[in-house]
Image (cartoon, rainbow, N blue to C red):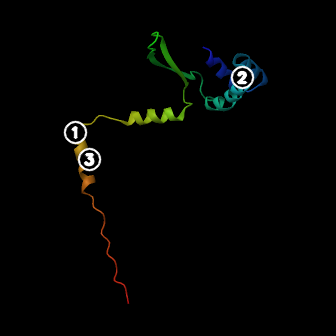
Amino acid sequence: KYVEPLITRSKNDTTTSRRVVFRYLQNKYAVKALFGEVAEKVANRPGGYTRVIKLGTRQGDAAEIAFIELVDFDENMAKTQKAAAKKTRRSRKATKAEEAPVAETEAPVTEEAPKAE
């Protein structure tokens, strides 16, 4: 509820929008990054800019911990999700059949021509 309106406001790069966002953030470097980098990444997105990942509870006082990140902003997270989605379960017979042809391949033999003296 705090970040979403600021990101929506950063899509329209005007002096008024910058002043409204600066009133909340109180940091000109954060405003510059929001209107520069973040606004470019979420320009075509209609809303729902953040993702909340619940991490569990803290050991000391059992308070719930959550991690908030921008959706489609971190390229590393997107790559790991795609890699994890490719894994499928297969039977053991299929893996043995795939490994067998790989082991039988041989390197091609090349012959050298005799040198003239």
Q: Dot 3, crowdedness within 10 Å: few (<14), some or many (≥20)?
A: few
**Distance Cα–Cα, label 1 vs label 2:** 57 Å
7 is higher (above) or lower (below) than 59: below
Q: Is residue 47 left or right of residue 18?
A: left
Asked which quadrant contains residue 36, the reply is: top right
Considering the numbered disc 1 on the image, is that residue within a helix, a strand or a loop? helix
For marks 1 and 2 on the same chain, the one whose residue lies earlier in the sequence: 2
Residue tagged by mark 2? Answer: 27
For marks 1 and 3 on the same chain, the one whose residue lies earlier in the sequence: 1
Residue tagged by mark 1? Answer: 92
Considering the numbered disc 2 on the image, is that residue within a helix, a strand or a loop? loop
Q: Please name the amino acid that badge 2 sits on.
A: Asn
Q: Nearer the viewer, mark 2 or mark 3?
A: 2
Do the numbered discs 2 and 3 sit on residues whose CB atoms are within 8 Å? no
Q: Is residue 65 left or right of residue 39?
A: left
For marks 2 and 3 on the same chain, the one whose residue lies earlier in the sequence: 2
Residue at the image position 36 percent from the left and 84 percent from the top: 115
Q: How many marks?
A: 3
Residue at the image position 46 percent from the left and 12 percent from the top: 60
Q: Please name the amino acid that badge 3 sits on.
A: Glu
**Residue 23's x, y, as percent?**
74, 16
**Distance Cα–Cα, label 2 vs label 3:** 57 Å
Q: Please name the amino acid that badge 1 sits on.
A: Arg
**Residue 64's x, y, as percent?**
47, 12
Q: Nearer the viewer, mark 1 or mark 2?
A: 2
